């Protein structure tokens, strides 16, 4: 590695922790662009493969089922190995699978490729969040993770919008070729730019984290038992499950909902359904990063911010589902996006306030198992109920899930006031 003045490598400088966030941002962008593309071409898939709403929902659920089931094992592997290697390897694998999705000829091909993409992507967030936390102390952690979270929103917004346009112009297969190919081209950039803490010892804050050092290694079962023994950590898991359920409803069904409710084409529906929600979520995440780090000065502070954001977002979800025009729908989406972004900025930071560094990968994996396990039921469940009751009342009912999740978050914040970090003794 090239040295900089003072005898340090560039990965040991103060600014590298922010450069790291920038590098991971591109990876996160394609992580979500690849996911969102399929939901923007559902009308085309429905026509070509003659699918019901329930079958369309299963395409989204197949990704999430595998993602959730593999998450705890991914977290354990991340804690034992190189986070850099898992990030780069995952990107290469899921990008290849994304491109191969374009070769699908029958319905089960779609299910298979979406499931395999879920397997590849399940390693990314345990590895990337753990890596960011290793370079960022608690006083900058929500800001760093909030900045990274903006890649999720832009990836969803631009990925969804581009997929809708390409789906109408060149056929539904074209966005998968595009996103898969560009993702593969990103691999060399991460190969040269990413470093694990052991490759950049100086400036890494992992050892003097507020939680303090613990045992060098802890198994998956031991980590799970430690996490579930903490009432506040259980609250974080419950809040994430509810929030992710609603998020998956919005991501998977809003493009179809807009097309059906307002009688617009696939490209316009994808644009309206993703752009307002995701762009405002971006601003919400930046704001939430500052709020989360400010609130972290008091125990349970991040969770209070998250719980309040979900409660404020609940009426916006209801209004979006019952909107009578594109304009009122867009206004409701702006409210959802701001509240969702504030919540999202501290998803993993709240849990990392409660666990020691040695179990961060496993904690993130466990969160993804619970959160995506709940979310995996959403596309299929909404599809089944949408066939029976219509999408509008079905989506509107998910506002109550936000209310429940927000309430759990506020309760968890009270429990978090008295909680000691794992590894600090009885409590």
Image: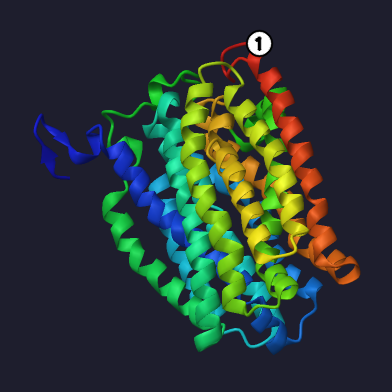
For the point 68% across and 80% down, the residue is: 43
For the point 59% across and 70% down, the residue is: 270
Decide if residue 133 is on the left or right side of residue 37. Answer: left
Identify the residue under disc 1.
Answer: 426
Taking the image as drawn, is residue 258 in sight? Answer: yes
Q: Position of residue 204 (x, y in %)?
A: 33, 29
Q: Position of residue 255 (x, y in %)?
A: 65, 69
Label 1 packing within 10 angstroms: few (<14), some (14-19), many (20+): few
Question: 112 or 17, which lies in front?
Answer: 17
The quarter of the displayed image where residue 172 is located: bottom right
Residue at the farthest right position:
388
For the C terminus, give its image quadrant: top right
Question: 410 or 24, which lies in front?
Answer: 410
Decide: is 26 above or below 158: above
Q: Position of residue 325 (x, y in %)?
A: 70, 65
Secondary structure category for the residue under label 1: loop
Decide: is 355 above or below 103: above
Question: 157 or 408, which lies in front?
Answer: 157
For the point 57% across and 64% down, the residue is: 35
Taking the image as drawn, is residue 81 in sight? Answer: no
Question: 355 or 302, which lies in front?
Answer: 302
Q: Give the colouring mode of the picture.
A: rainbow
Residue at the farthest left position:
5
Count the numbered circles shown.
1
For the N terminus, give its image quadrant: top left
For the point 12% across and 39% down, the residue is: 3
Decide: is 58 above or below 152: below
Q: Position of residue 59 (x, y in %)?
A: 70, 70
């Amino acid at each position: 590695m090239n040295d900089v003045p003072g005898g340090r490598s560039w990965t040991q400088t103060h600014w590298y922790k922010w450069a790291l966030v920038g590098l991971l941002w591109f990876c996160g962008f394609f992580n979500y662009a690849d996911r969102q593309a399929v939901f923007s071409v559902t009308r085309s898939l429905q026509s070509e493969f003659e699918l019901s709403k329930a079958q369309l929902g299963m395409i989204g659920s197949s990704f999430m089922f595998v993602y959730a089931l593999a998450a705890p094992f991914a977290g354990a592997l991340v804690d034992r190995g190189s986070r850099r290697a898992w990030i780069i390897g995952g990107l290469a694998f899921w990008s290849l699978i994304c491109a191969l999705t374009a070769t699908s000829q029958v319905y089960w091909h779609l299910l298979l490729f979406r499931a395999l993409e879920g397997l590849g992507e399940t390693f990314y967030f345990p590895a990337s969040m753990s890596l960011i936390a290793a370079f960022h102390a608690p006083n900058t952690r929500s800001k760093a993770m909030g900045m990274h979270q903006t890649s999720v929103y832009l990836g969803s917004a631009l990925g969804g919008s581009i997929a809708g346009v390409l789906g109408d112009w060149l056929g539904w297969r074209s966005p998968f070729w595009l996103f898969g190919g560009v993702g593969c081209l990103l691999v060399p950039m991460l190969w040269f730019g990413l470093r694990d803490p052991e490759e950049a010892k100086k400036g890494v804050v992992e050892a003097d984290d507020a939680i303090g050092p613990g045992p060098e290694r802890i198994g998956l079962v031991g980590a799970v038992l430690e996490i579930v023994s903490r009432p506040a950590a259980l609250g974080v898991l419950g809040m994430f499950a509810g929030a992710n359920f609603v998020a998956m409803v919005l991501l998977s069904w809003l493009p179809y909902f807009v097309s059906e409710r307002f009688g617009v084409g696939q490209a316009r529906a994808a644009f309206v359904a993703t752009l307002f929600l995701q762009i405002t979520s971006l601003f919400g995440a930046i704001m939430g990063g500052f709020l989360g780090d400010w609130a972290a000065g008091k125990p349970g502070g991040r969770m209070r911010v998250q719980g309040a954001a979900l409660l404020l977002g609940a009426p916006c979800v209801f209004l979006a589902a019952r909107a009578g025009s594109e304009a009122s729908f867009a206004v409701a989406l702006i409210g959802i996006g701001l509240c969702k972004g504030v919540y999202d900025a501290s998803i993993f930071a709240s849990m990392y306030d409660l666990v020691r560094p040695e179990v961060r990968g496993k904690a993130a994996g466990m969160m993804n198992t619970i959160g995506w396990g709940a979310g995996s039921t959403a596309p299929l469940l909404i599809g089944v109920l949408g066939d029976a009751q219509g999408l509008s009342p079905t989506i509107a009912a998910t506002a109550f899930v936000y209310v429940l999740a927000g309430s759990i978050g506020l309760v968890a914040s009270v429990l978090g006031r008295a909680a000691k970090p794992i590894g600090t003794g009885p409590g």
